[in-house]
Image (cartoon, rainbow, N blue to C red):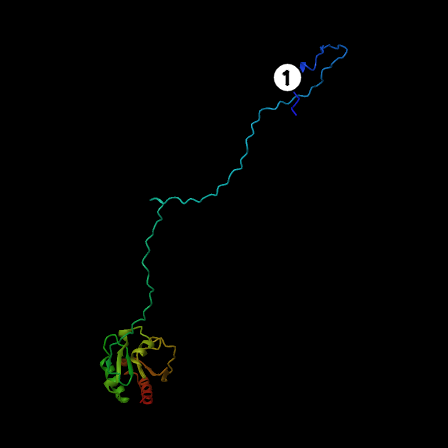
Amino acid sequence: MENQVTNNANALRLFFTEEVFLVKDESVEILPLRNPEPVLVAENVSVIEAKEPVLKPEIAQIPGINSTNIPKVYPQGPEIPHIVAEPAPEKTFKFLGGNKKSVLILVNDNEHDVSTEQGRELLRKIVKAVDLGTPDFAILNYANYSGTDYAELQRFFKPAIMLSFGVEIADLKLNLTWQNEIIVHESTRIIFAPNLHHLDSDLTAKKTLWGHLQKIK
């Protein structure tokens, strides 16, 4: 069925044949509107679609290496070798005799190799009294090795008997006391007496020495 709705003016006249008059009715008062509410006119609002920012992953950029960014290279110092303390060389001594029987005779004379003529003669009597010949003992002038202690003498000569003329216990750094008796220190028998030159004229000291010599024969 065809649509019967039409807006054509000629077609409408076929249906509305009577005349229509527009009469103004003055009995009806049309009052104006009080406080008319403002009519909001829609402005042309441009809507911009908000786009969420896209977070781009940050990429750590390594700056390019140029001549100014070249890392400094420090020269390595020479390696310091570990220094090991070397043991002190063993002290050597110049002495008279052969030391075959490990008998060490210490003298102390700054002017003579052994002692004065009187002192040398007394020493000859002493070694003869204990049946010693020149090859059997060692004579060391301590005046040429001042400051040498007993330990150094012992390492070099290894004496079984030591006769000390004019060399004191303190000189040898021994914690001992001389009481006119033979001292046995470690494996060494030690006799202390005055300097040979002075001993020759000291009868008391000479007699004490003779008594000690008889004990070590």
Furthest toward the right, the residue is 27
17 relative to 113 in the view: left or right: right
Which residue type does callout 1 highlight?
Asn
Q: Position of residue 58 (x, y in %)?
A: 47, 43
113 versus 126 height, above or below: above
Quadrant of the rendered image containing residue 143: bottom left
Q: Position of residue 92 (x, y in %)?
A: 27, 75
The quadrant the C terminus occupies is bottom left
Residue situated in front as seen by the camera: 139 or 201 = 139
Element type at marker 1? loop
Q: Nearer the viewer, residue 68 or 82?
A: 68
- 46 left or right, relative to 80: right
Q: Quadrant of the N terminus?
A: top right
Q: Quadrant of residue 193?
A: bottom left
Mark 1 neighbour density, 10 Å: few (under 14) some (14–19) many (20 or more): few
Residue 173 vertical position relative to residue 18 in the rendered view, above or below: below
User: Viewed as shown, does residue 210 lie left or right of 26?
Assistant: left
What residue is pinned by disc 1?
8
Q: Position of residue 159 (x, y in %)?
A: 31, 82
Residue 137 percent across, percent down from the top left: 26, 84
Q: Nearer the viewer, residue 174 or 123?
A: 174
Q: How many marks?
A: 1
Q: Is residue 174 above or below residue 2?
A: below
Image quadrant assignment for residue 61: top left
Considering every residue shown, the one lying at the far front of the view is: 1
Q: Residue at x 63, y 17 (%)?
A: 8
Q: Is residue 3 above or below residue 88?
A: above
Identify which residue, 92 or 13, lies in the foreground: 13
